[in-house]
Image (cartoon, helix red, strand yellow):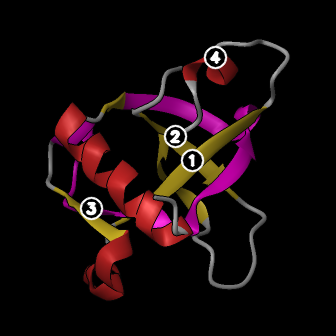
């Protein structure tokens, strides 16, 4: 598992405005954590498909069908960055191309007000 990989994840239980259910996520944590067997937490950004999510403004990144193996047009929800136990990751989908990862990283900096 590496930064930029897409996985199906079980985001249950969740509450409030957070994304729930089985959905794609993009791995954002550093590879040194991702590849350490004893490190259970993985930092992810959930991916959604509803068109309404695209109106979230600068924290929503459009991902076209086929990007990294996605079967539908999707939106990466940078404002919902979270951690999961790696046992919640069920199936690898693919890897996002570098240009999409750069866009996600830049928006994440904006969402967290990191210069």
Local crowd size for mark 2, using a 10 Å CA cut-off: few (<14), some (14–19), many (≥20): many
Q: Magenta stretch?
A: 67-93
Q: Can residue 97 be seen in this view?
A: no
In percent of width and height, residue 62 lies at: 21, 63
Image mark for residue 28:
2
- 3D distance between C-alphas at marks 1 and 3: 15 Å
For discs 3 and 2, the disc positioned in front in the rendered view: 2
* Separation (CA) of disc 1 from disc 4: 15 Å
Marks 3/4 in contact by CB < 8 Å: the verdict is no
| SS under mark 2 | loop
Tags 1 and 3 touching, CB below 8 Å: no
| Badge nearest the viewer, 1 or 4 | 4
Task: Check contact, mark 2 vs mark 1: CB within 8 A.
Answer: yes
Q: Which residue carries the number 4 mark?
A: 32
Counting every numbered tag in the picture gives 4
17 lies above or below 78: below
Image disc number at residue 44? 1
Q: How far apart are marks 2 and 1 (CA)?
A: 5 Å
Which numbered dot is residue 74?
Answer: 3
């Amino acid at each position: 598992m590496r930064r930029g990989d897409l996985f199906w994840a079980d985001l249950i239980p969740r509450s409030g405005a957070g994304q729930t259910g089985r959905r794609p996520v993009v791995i954002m944590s550093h590879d040194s954590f991702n590849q350490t067997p004893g490190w259970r937490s993985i930092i992810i950004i959930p991916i959604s498909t509803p068109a309404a999510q695209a109106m979230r403004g600068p924290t929503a990144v459009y991902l076209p069908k086929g990007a990294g193996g996605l079967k539908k047009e999707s939106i990466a929800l940078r404002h919902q960055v979270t951690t999961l136990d790696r046992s919640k990751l069920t199936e690898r989908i693919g890897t996002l191309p570098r240009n999409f990862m750069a866009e996600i990283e830049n928006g994440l900096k904006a969402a967290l007000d990191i210069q």
